[in-house]
Image (cartoon, grey):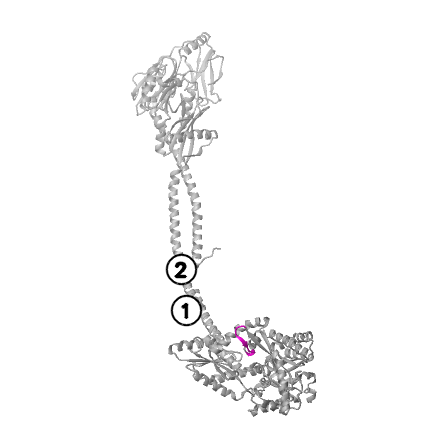
């Protein structure tokens, strides 16, 4: 994971150097090997610049009906995430993922402190009580990311410039291969996972 | 077809055969079906066993899986895995492996090729296929299949459980050895023997473990190898005379590796069970057949018993016991048969009575027949034996019945017999006396309780009755009888002897012309002698024991010797001289008479030839019998004799009796005519004793008539006889016949005959029968005597030397008389 992060830094840096132009709509279509659109896949664009995390940036992963909601949460590095339990039963949320190892021992309601995810990578969430509960947190070092809809399409506004991008879907421990792209106006990107 | 002595055997045999056949027809397919069923059961058992086996393994798998899942779900273990804490993982696996009795345990990471195993199995874990195997294991386990594998040359059942955090991050694989423990566990549940057999690239088929006899298990290895090659799952193998069904199931197969489980079910227990059933069936069959046999025996016996009873009744009838009426008790076929037997019995009885009537009765006269008479005498004898009283058997014969029958007709003869029978019956003394007709003209009378005096009185009564002519069919006929009497116990102790003796007496009565004769033993001796004489007679002819005697014959008027009658004498070597009346009758009966006649003719010719040589021209008369007259060759034989002795036909005279002519008149007439045609001189002998009339004789070519001595002998004393002789002579002369008188015993008679015109004579006065050599002596003496007589001056007008007499010039030729 660390090596990937290093590799991503350079294009990001490069993209930051280029002058910002007008923002453009980028539509990414993610399909699997057989060409079927993949929903809930994440595409992240890197412009090579370090973009500061907006203050108060964070997310909520609610446990409701013995499900993590949302199932897939994408955040920028350093974001804080709350895990409120809206079920009447208690949960024991844990992660053995290297990006963020944690354990929220049997609780209900909202744990007092949100957790900070300051390392890029994939965190797989589980509940030690309810094996069927699976959730993913995808932590990226960029503010440009989007999730595909049911048709495998994700839309993002990006300024023209040089970018690199990677796609990921749950089950993958690592993002897909890094691609480079120069954006000048609305662009459609096709990614095959 | 088998022959049965009894109907019930046939019934029993037939039914039992059918029953046994039906039973066999049932038992044989049953046996086949039972065998098939036993095999089906064994197959079923093995199929069930297989399902149980599979189910057991799945159950085991499930519980092992759950146990393994406990480890996989353990938070601490997952943490150790997530943090790649190899040492902790290994120690956890080790402790868990012990807890669930697994022999192999390892963890395979999902992300990288990390494989952590317990110390013992390290070498097996790092194969190139380890991960692929694990993946396959997962797929298999999830689809409910069982995963087996050979790890380090040993077979294991592998249980693979994912480790989730919460995504699958790796797998725990637990291996359970396929060994004797598993085999016995399966056996306990399925009651089947189990064997595990495996093959690895390094080693050919080998037995891992087996619950059966090691020898059988080893045998299985070989069989399984073959079966596996042919991709079959079911098989049969025979071991120690037992048949085993095999079910082979592949547990694992990859490349050269294979692990098989072989379930073995013996057919034997099922066969034993079923053969017990089969044996029971056989026993039941046997018992059934026995019961049926007894039943059949009983029923057929019930059926045939009345038949046997009827057979017994029929036997009674067969034995002549007609008195018992057969009891008819049933209305079925047996009853019908009994009725039929009854009517048969009645019919047979009637027929028997009729046959008895025929057998014991004389149809013609209505009297008893010979058989009945003999029985009657027998019965009477039985009664008399106790009372020691006498009884008499009288046999009566009608003289000359045959000629009467022939001349007056058979109807007449029958009526005569009936009449005589009636006469006999009317004169018996008591109703117990018995009259029977023995033969054609022979009757027999049994007089009970009679002595000789009474018997002769009866005979005299009969004679008295028959003194008067009997009237039959309007004709009067004289009946003359011969009567023989025998008495019990004087003349015989049984019916045969009495009847024979009475008949002997009858013969004697006929022979001696006595009215009746009472049997005496002297008669018997004569008779028995006769028999030996007959055989001796044949020899006598051959050995010259016979002699020719000549009784001289003279001319009554001139007293000239004319010749003689040739007579026969028999000089028996033991008995001495035997007279012809002692053997001629029997010679006639037996046919020897022909030989005697031939002998006589020959001797006569010889004698005549001898006299001729001496210059004596005399004639000889030879008697011919009935048989001779029936001999058509006789004329030729005589002609031959005459020519061979150089004699003319006048030298020989032939004498025939009336009786001999009557036997076969036509034939006799032919012979007689032939002889006459030859020029032979024929004479009727014993004239007056027969029935022949002169009218009949006239038709015959005879020249001479000899008056029977019975008329001549006493004609000097009996005027009746004399008148008969006279009228006979007259009649004969009228018919142109020469008359010869026999039995001249004194000179008075001779003279009397001469006066009556008799032509020739013979008798004791003239000369007794004498041997031929004496005849010439007699001749000389006779001639001399007569010369003396002439000298004395008797009434004889001439004396001629007979030697000078030419017989040819007989003065009494027929033409002379006419």
Mark 2 residue crowding within 10 angstroms, few (<14) / some (14–19) / many (20+): some
Quadrant of the rendered structure where residue B742 is?
A: bottom right
Q: Secondary structure at mark 1?
A: loop
The residue lying toward the viewer, choosing from B684 and B101, is: B684
A93 left or right of B602 in image: left
Report the chain holding disc 2: B
Image coords of residue B187 (percent x, y): 36, 32
Q: Chain of mark 1?
A: B
Q: Is residue B332 visible?
A: no
If you read the primary sequence from the N terminus, does the residue marked by circle 1 or circle 2 appear first? 2
Mark sitting on residue B400 = none
Q: Is residue B20 visible?
A: yes
In the image, residue A88 above or below residue B391: above
- The residue carrying mark 1 is B326
Of residue B682 and residue B350, the one placed in the foreground of this image is B682
Q: Is residue A54 above or below residue B203?
A: above
Q: Secondary structure at mark 2?
A: helix
Q: Residue furthest top?
A: A17
Check disc 2 and report the residue beneath it.
B301
Q: Is residue B574 magenta?
A: yes
- Say above or below: B551 vs B98: below
Q: Quadrant of the C terminus of chain B?
A: bottom right
Bounds of the magenta segment: B573-581
> Of B243 and B602, which appears nearest the observer?
B602
The residue at 53%/85% (across/down) is: B480
Whether discs 1 and 2 lie on one chain: the answer is yes
Residue B24 in percent (x, y) is at 43, 48
- Foreground pick, A192 / B181: B181
Percent coordinates x, y for residue B404 in the rendering = 57, 83
Query: Disc 1 and disc 2: Cα gap in Å?
Result: 20 Å
Residue B319 x %, y %:
44, 68
């Amino acid at each position: 994971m660390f090596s990937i992060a290093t590799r991503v830094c350079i294009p990001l840096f490069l993209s930051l150097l280029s002058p910002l132009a007008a923002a453009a709509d980028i539509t990414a279509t993610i399909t699997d090997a057989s060409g079927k659109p993949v929903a809930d896949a994440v595409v992240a664009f890197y412009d090579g610049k370090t973009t500061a995390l907006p203050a108060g940036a964070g997310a909520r992963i609610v446990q409701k009906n013995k499900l993590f909601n949302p199932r897939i949460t994408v955040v920028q590095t350093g974001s804080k995430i709350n895990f409120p339990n809206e079920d009447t039963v208690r949960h024991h949320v844990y992660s053995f993922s290297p990006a963020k190892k944690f354990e929220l021992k049997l609780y209900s309601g909202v744990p007092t402190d949100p957790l900070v995810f300051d390392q890029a990578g994939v965190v797989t969430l589980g509940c030690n009580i309810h094996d069927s509960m699976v959730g993913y947190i995808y932590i990226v070092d960029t503010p440009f990311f989007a999730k595909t809809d049911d048709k495998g399409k994700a839309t993002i506004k990006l300024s023209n410039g040089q970018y690199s991008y990677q796609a990921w879907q749950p089950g993958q421990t690592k993002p897909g291969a890094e691609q480079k792209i120069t954006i000048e106006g609305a662009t459609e990107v096709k990614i095959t996972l | 077809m088998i022959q049965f002595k009894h109907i019930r055997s046939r019934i029993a045999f037939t039914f039992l055969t059918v029953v046994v056949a039906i039973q066999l027809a049932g038992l044989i397919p049953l046996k086949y079906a039972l065998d098939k069923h036993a095999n089906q059961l064994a197959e079923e058992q093995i199929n069930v066993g297989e399902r149980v086996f599979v189910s057991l393994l799945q159950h085991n798998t499930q519980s092992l899986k759950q146990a393994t899942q406990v480890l996989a779900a353990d938070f601490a273990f997952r943490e150790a895995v997530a943090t790649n804490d190899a040492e902790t993982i290994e120690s956890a696996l080790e402790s868990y492996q012990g807890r669930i009795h697994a022999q192999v345990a390892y963890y395979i990471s999902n992300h990288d090729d990390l494989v952590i195993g317990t110390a013992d199995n390290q070498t097996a874990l790092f194969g190139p296929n380890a991960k692929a195997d694990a993946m396959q294991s997962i797929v298999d386990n999830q689809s409910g299949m069982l995963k087996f594998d050979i790890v380090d040359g040993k077979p294991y059942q592998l249980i693979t459980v994912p480790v989730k955090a919460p995504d699958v991050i790796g797998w725990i694989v637990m291996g359970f050895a396929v060994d004797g423990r598993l085999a016995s566990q399966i056996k306990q549940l399925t009651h089947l023997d189990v064997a595990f057999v495996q093959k690895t690239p390094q080693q050919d088929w080998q037995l891992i473990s087996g619950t059966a006899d090691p020898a059988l298990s080893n045998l299985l290895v070989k069989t399984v190898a073959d079966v596996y090659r042919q991709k079959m799952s079911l098989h049969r193998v025979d071991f120690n005379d037992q048949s085993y069904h095999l079910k082979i199931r592949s547990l694992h197969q990859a490349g050269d590796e294979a692990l098989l489980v072989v379930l073995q079910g013996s057919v034997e227990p099922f066969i034993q069970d079923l053969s017990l059933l089969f044996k029971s069936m056989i026993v039941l069959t046997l018992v059934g057949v026995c019961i049926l046999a007894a039943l059949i025996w009983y029923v057929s016996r019930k059926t045939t018993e009345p038949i046997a009873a009827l057979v017994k009744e029929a036997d009674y009838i067969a034995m002549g016991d007609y008195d018992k009426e057969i009891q008819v008790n049933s209305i079925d076929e047996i009853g019908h048969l009994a009725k039929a037997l009854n009517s048969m019995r009645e019919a047979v009885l009637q027929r028997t009575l009729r046959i008895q009537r025929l057998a014991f009765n004389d149809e013609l006269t209505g009297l008893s027949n010979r058989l009945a008479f003999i029985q009657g005498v027998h019965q009477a004898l039985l009664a008399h034996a106790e009372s020691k009283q006498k009884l008499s058997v009288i046999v009566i014969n009608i003289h000359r019945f045959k000629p009467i029958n022939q001349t007056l007709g058979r109807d007449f003869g029958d009526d005569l017999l009936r009449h005589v029978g009636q006469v006999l019956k009317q004169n018996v003394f008591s109703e117990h006396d018995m009259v029977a007709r023995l033969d054609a003209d022979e009757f027999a009378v049994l007089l009970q309780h009679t002595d000789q005096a009474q018997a002769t009185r009866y005979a005299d009564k009969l004679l008295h009755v028959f003194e008067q002519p009997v009237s039959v069919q309007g004709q009067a006929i004289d009946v003359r009888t011969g009567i023989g009497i025998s008495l019990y116990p004087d003349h015989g102790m049984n019916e045969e002897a009495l009847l024979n003796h009475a008949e002997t007496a009858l013969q004697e009565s006929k022979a001696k012309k006595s009215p009746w004769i009472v049997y005496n033993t002297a008669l018997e001796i004569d008779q028995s002698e006769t028999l030996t004489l007959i055989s001796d007679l044949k020899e006598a002819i051959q050995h010259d024991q016979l002699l020719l005697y000549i009784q001289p014959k003279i001319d009554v008027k001139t007293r000239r010797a004319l010749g003689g009658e040739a007579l026969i004498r028999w000089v028996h070597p033991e008995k001495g001289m035997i007279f012809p009346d002692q053997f001629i009758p029997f010679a006639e009966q037996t046919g020897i008479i022909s030989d005697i006649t031939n002998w006589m003719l020959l001797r006569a010719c010889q004698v005549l030839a001898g006299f001729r040589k001496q210059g004596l021209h005399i004639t000889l008369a030879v008697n011919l019998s009935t048989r001779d007259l029936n001999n058509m060759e006789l004329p030729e034989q005589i002609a031959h004799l005459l020519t061979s002795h150089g004699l003319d036909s006048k030298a020989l005279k032939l004498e025939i009796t009336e009786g001999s002519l009557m036997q076969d008149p036509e034939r006799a007439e032919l012979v007689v005519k032939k002889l006459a045609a030859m020029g032979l001189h024929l004479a009727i002998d014993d004239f007056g004793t027969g029935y022949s009339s002169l009218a009949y004789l006239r038709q015959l070519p005879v020249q001479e008539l000899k008056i029977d001595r019975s008329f001549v002998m006493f004609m000097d004393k009996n005027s009746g006889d004399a008148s008969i002789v006279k009228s006979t002579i007259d009649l004969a002369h009228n018919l142109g016949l020469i008359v010869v008188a026999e039995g001249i015993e004194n000179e008075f008679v001779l003279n009397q005959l001469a006066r009556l015109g008799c032509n020739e004579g013979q008798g004791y006065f003239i000369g007794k029968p004498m041997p031929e050599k004496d005849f010439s002596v007699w001749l000389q003496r006779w001639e001399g005597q007569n010369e003396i007589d002439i000298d004395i001056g008797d009434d004889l007008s001439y004396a001629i030397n007979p030697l000078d007499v030419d017989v040819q010039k007989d003065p009494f030729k027929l033409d002379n008389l006419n």
